[in-house]
Amino acid sequence: MKKTIFYHAGCPVCVSAEHDVIQLIGSENVDIVHLGEDKSEIETAEKLGVVSVPALVTPSQNVLHINFGASIDDIR
Amino acid sequence: MKKTIFYHAGCPVCVSAEHDVIQLIGSENVDIVHLGEDKSEIETAEKLGVVSVPALVTPSQNVLHINFGASIDDIR
């Protein structure tokens, strides 16, 4: 099974959500991508349908946007 | 451990998110509450900090608002 991907940008909202997601799903089931530090991943995230962070992309490629930290355009 | 609670109101966004959440966390770990059908739960949800649905309340009582279906005021 593909892993879930958690996209974030280091904002306080993201860090809080990351903690919750890892607690719920288990760290071994989630890949964490920091779009602020790894800007080359922004294009991939956008292609998956991510429009804001924090966001979870499920193994079935659905995007769950959690709370609202920052829009993708603000991270560039 | 307390269960996670998933609040929704039957909207298409909610149903899609519910499917994803159950897939990620496991149905045995989540209580599903339909605020449109069980309006007596709205006050409890609000006290927990839920301002829109779909939303997850974690066992540590953090609220994760997922995507955006409807604000609590629209459900009343």
Image (cartoon, coloured by chain):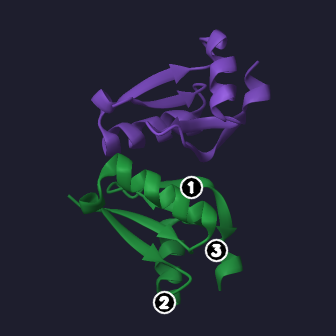
Chain colours: A green, B purple
Left-right relation of B53 to B18: right
The amino acid type of the residue labelled 1 equals His
Residue at the image point whose x is 62% and y is 65% from the top: A12
Earlier in the chain: of badge 1 and badge 2, it is 2
Question: Which residue is disc 1 drawn over?
Answer: A65
The amino acid pointed to by label 2 is Ser
Q: Residue at x 52, y 56 (%)?
A: A17
Say which amino acid is labelled 3. Answer: Ile
Q: Residue A72: which numbered mark, if any?
A: 3
B46 left or right of A66 in image: right
Q: Residues within 10 Å of mark 3 (few under 14, many from 20)?
A: many
Residue occupied by mark 2: A40
Q: Residue at x 57, y 38 (%)?
A: B55
- Secondary structure at numbered mark 1: strand
Q: Nearer the viewer, residue A37 or A57?
A: A37
| Front residue of this view, candidates A35 and A43 | A35
**Quadrant assignment for the N terminus of chain A:** bottom left
Image quadrant holding the C terminus of chain A, namely bottom right
- At horizontal 45% and vertical 35% (from top left) the residue drawn is B18
> Residue A10: x and y, percent?
56, 74
Note whether A46 is above or below A22 in the view shown: below
Q: Disc 3 versus disc 1: distance between alpha carbons?
A: 12 Å
Q: From this viewpoint, is residue A51 visible?
A: no
